[in-house]
Amino acid sequence: MTSHIETLVRQRDGKADESYDAHAELISIGADAIPAVINGLPSSTGKNQGPDSEEPSPL
């Protein structure tokens, strides 16, 4: 069964209104939402590692 917090974390990647509402509710929940938010982050292994894996842009 999926918790309410996990549902909110998934909604953060949805449509703008739904994402904003989920974000606001996660903030209001506070520290209790942190584990689910961390678990919802993309893995740091694999080829889609985000900005850290890219070359820095020149100044």
Image (tube, rainbow, N blue to C red):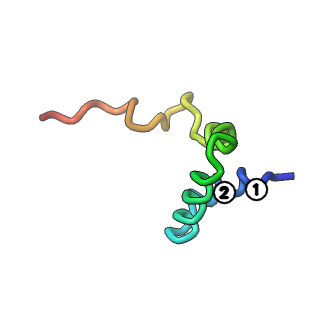
Examine the rendered structure and indicate whether residue 41 appears above or below residue 52.
below
Which three-letter amino acid code belongs to the residue tagged 1?
Answer: His
Residue 57 picture location, percent across and down: 21, 36
Assess whether mark 2 and mark 1 are in contact (beta carbons under 8 angstroms).
yes
**Disc 2, SS:** helix
The residue at the point 62 percent across, 60 percent down is: 11
**Residue 4 numbered mark, or none:** 1
Q: Residues within 10 Å of mark 2 (few under 14, many from 20)?
A: many
At a point 55% along the width and 63% down the height, the residue shown is: 19
Q: Which of 20/46 is in front?
A: 20
All told, the count of numbered labels is 2
Give the distance between the C-alpha atoms of the residues marked 1 and 2, in whole angstroms: 6 Å
Q: Quadrant of residue 56?
A: top left
Vertical side of 5 occupied by 45: above or below: above
Residue 12: x %, y % from top left = 57, 57
Residue that badge 2 annotates: 8
Q: Mark 2 belongs to which amino acid?
A: Leu
Q: Residue at x 55, y 59 (%)?
A: 24
Spot occupied by residue 49 in the image (x, y as percentages of width and height): 47, 34
Q: Quadrant of residue 35?
A: top right
Residue 37 coordinates in the image, percent (x, y): 62, 43
Q: Residue at x 72, y 51 (%)?
A: 6
Under circle 1, the secondary element is helix
- Vertical comparison of 39 with 25: above or below: above
| Quadrant position of the C terminus in the picture | top left
Q: Is residue 25 left or right of residue 49?
A: right
Name of the residue lying farthest toward the right: 1
Q: Residue furthest left?
A: 59
